[in-house]
Amino acid sequence: MNTRGDALPEVDVAGRRVHFLAWDSAEQWAWAGAITIAAELRRALEQQPRARLLLSGGKTPAPVYEALSRAPLAWDRIDVALVDERWLQPGDADSNSYLVRTTLLQDKAAQARFETLTRTGRSIEEAVASANLHARQVSDVVTLGMGDDGHTASLFPGMRGLEQALANPNAYVAVDATGCPGAGAWSRRISLTPAGLAPSRMRLLLIRGEHKRRLFERAADGLDPLELPVRLAFTTPGARLRVHWCP
């Protein structure tokens, strides 16, 4: 399969290098994203006993996860966790856990160890504390998404407590997105913070459609994550952001 895309020149955004790669089709985009993630996980497993992969929810990344599930990796040595989660039980069809289970954790990837953020009988405070314990293991790959409002993870523009969440020294926080249209019916959530993103060895943003491309270009023209939280993907110190886009 030809996965060659249109590699645009790297741009300097807020002192960070951003690599934007445009693909002609959704199929190329999905396989290229999967290959990129698999290559980094394979590299990590060559250097350490286990690798760690953080995944975002939403409909956009599902084809990438399905393609990645077929990658010939030592999945029994890979820990899969979430960038964020709605305050739902893992078996709920609207949860990010359910998305990961039904797309990635199939085929060869069924052997991976999966860490859900929520669990029956666990309060949201206990869930956040557990997530922060797991986050002591540095993530090799963090896969991010971007909503139509410019949110990433569960950090929404205009969200109450957004400034505090962005400055929180912990990897995960509980958030209240009440009144944020992008949050839909699920206002209580757990989210990765910039502090949780910073140590990761690779960060990848998966987006599709002309609107998302224009929105990311707008984000790249500014610095304030309070306006467009997706900016934390390239303003947070650490690994260069890689963006994979297709129409």
Image (spheres, rainbow, N blue to C red):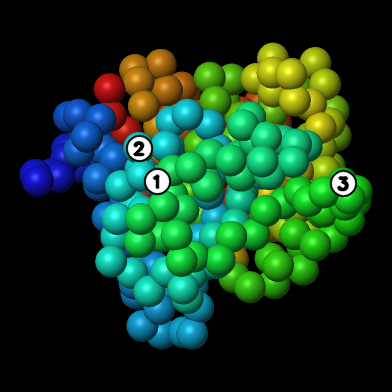
Q: Quadrant of the C terminus?
A: top left
Residue 152 lies, in percent from the top left, at: 59, 36
Which class describes the residues within 10 Å of circle 3: few (<14), some (14-19), or many (20+)? some
Separation of marks 2 and 3 at Cα, in angstroms = 30 Å
* Mark 2, residue position: 63
Judge by depth and name the residue closer to the eye, 27 or 5. 27
Q: Which three-letter amino acid code belongs to the residue tagged 1?
A: Tyr
Would you say 156 lies left or right of 25 here?
A: right
Q: Which mark is residue 65?
A: 1
Secondary structure at badge 3 equals helix
Q: Residue furthest left?
A: 2
Res 171 → quadrant: bottom right
- Which residue is rendered at x = 69% and y = 72% of the image? 136
- Which residue is rendered at x = 80% and y = 62% of the image? 130
Q: Earlier in the sequence, mark 2 or mark 3?
A: 2
Separation of marks 1 and 2 at Cα, in angstroms = 5 Å
Judge by depth and name the residue closer to the eye, 47 or 107. 107
Residue 76 lies, in percent from the top left, at: 46, 73
* Mark 3, residue position: 124
Q: Are marks 1 and 3 in contact (CB under 8 Å)?
A: no
Q: Which three-letter amino acid code belongs to the residue tagged 2?
A: Pro
Judge by depth and name the residue closer to the eye, 2 or 78. 78
- Which residue is rendered at x = 69% and y = 18% of the image? 184
Q: Which mark is residue 88?
A: none
Q: Are marks 1 and 2 in contact (CB under 8 Å)?
A: yes
- Which residue is rendered at x = 36% and y = 27% of the image? 208
Q: Which three-letter amino acid code belongs to the residue tagged 3?
A: Ile
Secondary structure at badge 2 equals helix
